[in-house]
C-alpha cells in the first residue's frame, strides 16, 4: 500500500482549513445582513412628544392616533399665501426625523404649496413597528387626510431617497397631480445587491420596495432627479427606472450632483419650480 505524500496531505489540510474560514466568514456576513438590515437601512432619531419643533417658517403639528396605540406625527409647513395651490406630501429619507428635512420645505412653500412631512414609525414623534407594510399604511393615512382637504389633482407626491419607494407605491394606488422622485432606486433588492453582491439578497431582505414595479403602473406624470455622482444610490441603479417610465415622463440628471445636495443645484431648483408652476 502506497501512502500519500506527506507534503500533499499537509497542502490539502491547509486548503480545507482556508475553505472553512472563507465559508465561515461568508455565512457570518450573510447572518449579519439578515439580522442587522434594519440598522443598516434605517437611522431614526426619536423625539419626545412633549418637545416642540422650532422651525423658521409657519407650520402646524398634527398627531394622529392609529389603531389605538401608534402615533403618526405630521408637520404641515404653510405657504405665505392663505389660499394654497395644493399640497406636497413629502416622504423623506432614512435619516433622523422631520427636523433633518425641514430645510427643503421652502422649495415648495415659495411656490404656493403646503408641505406635509410625516415621520416613519420610530422616527421623531411617530411610533409603531417599522415594517414595509407599516410604512405604506402611514403613507396612505397621510394621503387620505390630504384628500379630505384637496382634490387629487392638487396633490403632489414627493419622495426622497428611501421615501421614493413609498411615494411610488402610493402613486400606483391613488391619483395625484404628479409624482416627483429625488435620488430614487430601482428596487431595494437591486440596491442591496450592489452593496452585497455575493449574497442572495432577494431571500435575505425583509424590505423590497420594488419601485420599478410601482412606476410601471403610475398614471400621473413622473419626474425623476438623480445626481450623476451619487455615492449612496448609484446613478446606474436609478437610471434603470427609465425603462418603466412613460414617454412623457422625465428623468433629469444633475451633473456632478451627490445624494443630499440636489436642492442646492440651480438646475434642480429651476426644474422643480417649473414643475410646481406648470
Image (tube, rainbow, N blue to C red):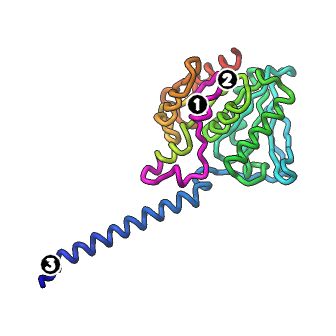
Residue at image x 64%, y 41%? 93
Which disc number belongs to residue 220?
A: 2
Q: Which is nearer the N-term, disc 2 or disc 3? A: 3
Give the magenta part as a residue range: 195-224
Q: Where does the image place residue 136, in percent across and percent down from the top left?
A: 71, 42
Q: Which mark is residue 111?
A: none
Whole-number angstrom distance, CA of label 2 to CA of label 3: 73 Å
Nearer the observer, 28 or 74: 28
Total marks drawn? 3
- Residue in front for this viewpoint, 238 or 109: 238
As drawn, the label of residue 262 is 1
The residue positioned farthest toward the bottom in the image shown = 1
Disc nearest the viewer among 1 and 2: 2
Q: Residue 84's x, y, as percent? A: 82, 22
Q: Secondary structure at mark 1?
A: helix
Which one is in front, 101 or 131?
A: 131
Q: Are marks 3 and 1 in contact (CB under 8 Å)?
A: no
Position of 232 with respect to 52 (left or right) is left
Task: Measure the C-alpha gap from mark 3 to mark 1.
Answer: 65 Å
**Where is mark 3, residue-wise?**
5
157 magenta-colored: no
Residue 53 x/y as whole percent: 81, 43
Q: Residues within 10 Å of mark 3 (few under 14, many from 20)?
A: few
Mark 2 lies on a secondary structure that is loop
Horizontally, is 26 left or right of 51 in the view?
left
Is disc 1 in contact with disc 2, using a CB cutoff of under 8 Å? no
Assess disc 2: are there few (<14), some (14-19) or many (≥20) residues with their C-alpha within 10 Å of its C-alpha. many
Residue 171 vs residue 144: left or right? left
> Looking at the image, is mark 3 or mark 1 earlier in the sequence?
3
Q: Is residue 265 above or below residue 237?
A: above
Relative to 218, residue 141 above or below: below
Amino acid at each position: 500500500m502506497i501512502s500519500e505524500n506527506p507534503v500533499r496531505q499537509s497542502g490539502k489540510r491547509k486548503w480545507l482549513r482556508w475553505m472553512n474560514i472563507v465559508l465561515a466568514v461568508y455565512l457570518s456576513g450573510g447572518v449579519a445582513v439578515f439580522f442587522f438590515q434594519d440598522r443598516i437601512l434605517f437611522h431614526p432619531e426619536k423625539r419626545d412628544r412633549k418637545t416642540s419643533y422650532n422651525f423658521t417658517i409657519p407650520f402646524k403639528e398634527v398627531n394622529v392616533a392609529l389603531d389605538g396605540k401608534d402615533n403618526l406625527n405630521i408637520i404641515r409647513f404653510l405657504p405665505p399665501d392663505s389660499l394654497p395651490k395644493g399640497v406636497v406630501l413629502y416622504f423623506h429619507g432614512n435619516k433622523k426625523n422631520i427636523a433633518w428635512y425641514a430645510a427643503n420645505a421652502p422649495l415648495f412653500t415659495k411656490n404656493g404649496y403646503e408641505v406635509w412631512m410625516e415621520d416613519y414609525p420610530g422616527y421623531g414623534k411617530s411610533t409603531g413597528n417599522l415594517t414595509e407594510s407599516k410604512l405604506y399604511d402611514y403613507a396612505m393615512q397621510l394621503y387620505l387626510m390630504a384628500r379630505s382637504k384637496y382634490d387629487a389633482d392638487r396633490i403632489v407626491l414627493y419622495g426622497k431617497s428611501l421615501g421614493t419607494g413609498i411615494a411610488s407605491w402610493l402613486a400606483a394606488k391613488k391619483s395625484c397631480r404628479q409624482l416627483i422622485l429625488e435620488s430614487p432606486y430601482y428596487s431595494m433588492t437591486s440596491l442591496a445587491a450592489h452593496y452585497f453582491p455575493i449574497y442572495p439578497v432577494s431571500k435575505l431582505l425583509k424590505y423590497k420596495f420594488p419601485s420599478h414595479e410601482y412606476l410601471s403602473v403610475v398614471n400621473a406624470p413622473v419626474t425623476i432627479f438623480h445626481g450623476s455622482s451619487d455615492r449612496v444610490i448609484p446613478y446606474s441603479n436609478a437610471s434603470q427606472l427609465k425603462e418603466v417610465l412613460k414617454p412623457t415622463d422625465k428623468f433629469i440628471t444633475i451633473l456632478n450632483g451627490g445624494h443630499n445636495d440636489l436642492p442646492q443645484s440651480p438646475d434642480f431648483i429651476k426644474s422643480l419650480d417649473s414643475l410646481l408652476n406648470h
